[in-house]
Amino acid sequence: MAGDSDQNSGDSDTGSLERFRRSQRRRLSSPEQNPPRLGGSGIVDGCLPRRSQCATGEPALPCALPTRRAEAATTSTSAIEASPGAGSSKRPSQSQFRHLRLGIETEFLLAARNPDHNRPRLDHFAEVLAANYNAHIDRSRRHPRMNSTLLAPNDPDDNKKWSMVYESTNWRDKSPWGIEMRSPILDVFPHSAWRAHVIKTWGYLDKHYKILGDDRCSTHIHVSMIPKYNLADLKHIASTIIHFEEAFEALMPDHRRGNGFAASNWLCSPYLRRQGKNRLQSIEAIRKANDEVEVFRLIQGLDNNNFCWNFLTVFGDKGTIEFRQPPASIRVADVLGWAELVMNFIQASLLFGSSAHIFPANVGGLRSFIEQVNVDGVNKPDWLRHIWEGKRKDMAFRPKQIHPERLSKWDSTQQLTEKIVAELRSSRMRQNLVYKANS
């Protein structure tokens, strides 16, 4: 887990994870226990709600919400109250939980509060920051350290530490320095310490540095899963993204809507709206995809990662789905709020599968959708309060169109496309779509 091995003590993530795994093995091996049968998405079979019997057409309002009526009344609009006889869906418990891993990338501007911590060059500034942070953190030996170079992490051990890396989009040649902070790989399981690691690091930064943001800065959240994403998972997540896209748009400031580094997955995909497909037709095309490559091609194409939801990072060692749309995070509540939102959204997408359309495609529907996931010791909905603050439940913004020439390119070469297709369809890559569980 995140952090060097010599730092783990007391209730470290590694120790907690091993205890959690041992308890799960004991539970499943006990003859008195009937272990739940897992479906393809890793959620217990039978937990999905019955399909809505609404008339065909654009899936805006459901006939029934798969939750208790009292919850529906407090978490959603009156239009989505559960009807009598609809039944209630089970919420996932710890025994049904699927191990997640997070990676958090935050672009911001940093200025040292103490002039002694400033330097005339960015690389020297980052070295001083890392050295001072590590000296501070080593007193407890319970939190991950920080790499002392601006180079992006390459060695697997580097992914156990925080990293300050060069970022061209917000670069400045003086203080406040434009820089990107990358988290270690953060393991998420019941009662893991990942939030404590984030709070500790941001607390140090806030005490010793001024943290600023501008329109060039953003926050990216990566999520991988163990077991790895399978084809059914990717279809469920991709189709749910298309359904709730206008709700996510309503949560964003204007400069993150229509941004060339975070384009609409429906409106700007070469194979969805630009091929004349409406949202229902787009979701149906995703549902019929034959393999992972076809899902990736539909949701964003194969030559560009600059979409709100980037699936191309499932390819290769990262094995993550990346949410790229949030603005700069300048306080810990920002970064933990966006991480909570993305994590809960992925979990809910796997729980409801193709039934997500029974929730309205607005802020109220999105909020009710992700509130169905509340695993004890994993989900902390209080961190979402400022995400919802000031947002009406009926808000839903149409995404902004971006001309293909304005869409910031990742690498549009034919060689890259052919490489992704060939390697993703090979059995070797299918076995390596997420970080190794014991890395």
Image (cartoon, rainbow, N blue to C red):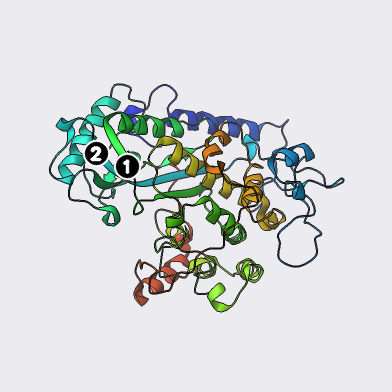
Residue that appears at 56% across and 63% down = 398
Q: In the figure, residue 403 lies in which quadrant?
A: bottom left
Badge 1: residue crowd in 10 Å (few <14, some 14–19, many ≥20) = some
Q: In the figure, residue 26 lies in which quadrant?
A: top right
Q: Is residue 291 above or below residue 101?
A: below
Q: Identify which amino acid the numbered label 1 is placed on.
A: Leu
Residue that appears at 12% across and 43% down = 120
Tell me the residue that label 2 is attached to: 111
Q: Residue furthest left?
A: 120
Is residue 42 among what the camera can see?
no
Q: Identify which amino acid the numbered label 2 is placed on.
A: Ala
Q: Nearer the viewer, residue 439 or 173?
A: 173
Q: Percent position (x, y) of residue 208?
A: 27, 30
Q: Classify mark 1: helix, strand or loop.
A: strand
Evaluate if marks 2 and 1 touch, with contact meaning CB atoms under 8 Å apart: yes
Badge 2: residue crowd in 10 Å (few <14, some 14–19, many ≥20) = many
User: Seen in the image, is 173 located left or right of residue 283?
Assistant: left
Tell me the residue that label 1 is attached to: 212
Q: Is residue 51 above or below residue 141?
A: below
